Image (cartoon, rainbow, N blue to C red):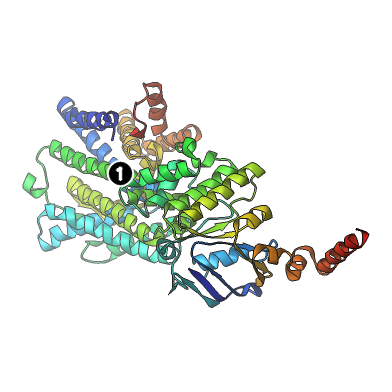
Amino acid sequence: MSARSWLLHGGLLLIALVFPLVFSSNFAINFGVMALFYAFIGQSWNIAGGFAGQLSFGHVVFFGAGAYASTILQMRFGFNPWLGLPASALAGAVVGFVIAFLSFRAGLKGSYFALITLAFAEVLRIIANSVEITGGGLGMLIPAKPSAANFQFPERIGFYYLILALTAGSIVIALWLKRSRFGAQLAAIRENEDAARALGVNVFREKVKVLMLSGAIGGIGGCFFAQYFLYIDPLVVFGIDKSVEMLLVSMIGGAGTVYGPLIGAVLLAAVGDFTRVLTDVQGLSLVLYGALLLVIIAFLPNGLIDLFKHFGKRGPKPLSKESE
Amino acid sequence: MLKVTGLSKVFGGLKAVDDASLSVSEGSIVALIGPNGAGKTTLFSCIAGFQKINAGKVEFQGEDITGLPVHTIARRGMVRTFQVTQPFARLTVHENIAVGAYQQFPRRDEAWEHARRIGKQLGMEALLDQSAAGLTVAGRKRLELARTLATGPRLLLLDEVMAGLNPSEIIEIVEMVRAIRASGVTVLLIEHVMQAVMSLSEYIYVLSYGKIIAEGQPREVVSDKAVIEAYLGRGAAEQIAQSHEQEGAHA
């Protein structure tokens, strides 16, 4: 990478690191946690939908699988909640493998694939609602025992730095995808599967791999969510709302770009908090999201990131052409 | 290098390819010609694994590859281009070629360097940073060629890479195909541009209604009665022969 892009990544990280020290109110830190959380789960969608072109309407399926896997291990089997992180990643990856294997073997593409993911999310929601181990429709309450060893940071800032680390990790993965053979093959699959196949890309295998990667990230998101709110139920972690939010932050920010989900998530969290402060009207934030989405589709079809690109172009041109 | 025996492909009641056999020896340029709708592209698709075949056998470098997946065949060194070009539209030319180059070089810097080299070889150096969506027809045809060439193939299946090009562009591509062969790659091509077919190929197969109706050296094939009739209709060969005789008599 060029010096310029190191400066960009480093600068962003620095801003994120000092943010909770400068704005230390609970409100501000909660805003930061939610923005980073949406950036993280948005990146999960973005890796499958944006990078590999496998659009999904039911990405919450990975999120929910991770949330339930980690919470069940903790509540039913007494595991330390920190073990929930790898366990939820594994659960998300397994669900990703199953969905990818079944639907890509059957040759499902485009909107058919999107609908099948929605169906899987609904099936898992109904299962979570009906079996005993998940606590059924009542969900599961994780008792509050604040201590960092217990994944319940006494101060919110602990959660902030954890989700910052996770989000930074997801951005590193996205950067790697932009510059690796795997990422190049995914881009080829997104643009034209037949042509990718003709050049020797194992389309089926790469699509299964990317859905497992995306699923693992989504699963970790679910684990974080469970520990942050200490409560999960089928509607919250398998409901369509989260699926929509995951794809919305990517699309608003810029699908298929490294920073798209982060940009979209900051905006989404800002709109959400802003409307809650100004008014009590339930659901007003959703109305605003809808309006924002319309405006962005009309004027910035590639997402808000285009604004930054236009802005960047006015600056001095980098000397090396390799910078991208 | 490539040996196709008794290949048939049926779509519903239509025999698109009917008991076709052909062979391509290493280091040669072989052409597959025939009237529109003869089944040339279907035959290509069957050979490269894009279509399941109903009967027959495809052997490549001495091994039976019938029914293998497309990407496996491609990795073994037989790569096709598409008649209707299929660029990765939102990627740059360089990225397009790099997808092919990554098949040979897993490391990014090597793959990108190889892609640059191939781009240069095919005269696309100035276009490398352009989006593939903005290319002209000639540019797209070249990109098809560049991408496949970047995979390091042993045998290239070129499906009408000259269609829609102007005469000077055709001359350039003909030179490129010659250079590709000189670098050790065998070429099987479908082409309508007869000037290119005649000057490039050493051996020609003619397909009509899914059947191989003639094969041989370029000169033998173009004077073949069955071939002339396939292109110009029944009785055409006799009429031409007669007119040649009359001309002879007048002279």
Query: Where is residue B209 shown, x and y percent of the image?
Result: 69, 70
The residue that disc 1 covers is A174
Query: Where is residue B220 shown, x and y percent of the image?
Result: 69, 66
Left/right placement of residue A155 relative to residue B150 reads left
Left/right placement of residue A303 relative to residue A216 reads right
- Identify the residue shown where x is 22% and y is 38%: A33
The part of the image, by quadrant, that contains residue B91 is top left
Whether A270 is drawn above or below A235: the answer is above
Query: Where is residue A223 shown, x and y percent of the image?
Result: 21, 51
Left/right placement of residue A315 relative to residue A2 reads right
Query: Where is residue A125 shown, x and y percent of the image?
Result: 32, 59
- Identify the residue shown where x is 34% and y is 36%: A268
Task: Look at the numbered disc 1 and give the secondary structure of its residue.
Answer: helix
Q: Quadrant of the C terminus of chain B?
A: bottom right
The part of the image, by quadrant, that contains residue A116 is bottom left
In the picture as drawn, the residue positioned furthest to the front comes out as B251
Q: Is residue A262 visible?
A: yes
Tell which of B234 and B210 is nearer to you: B234
Callout 1 crowding tier (Cα within 10 Å): few <14, some 14–19, many ≥20:
many
Tell which of B115 and A46 is nearer to you: B115
Q: Chain ID for label 1?
A: A
Whether A139 is drawn above or below A322: the answer is below
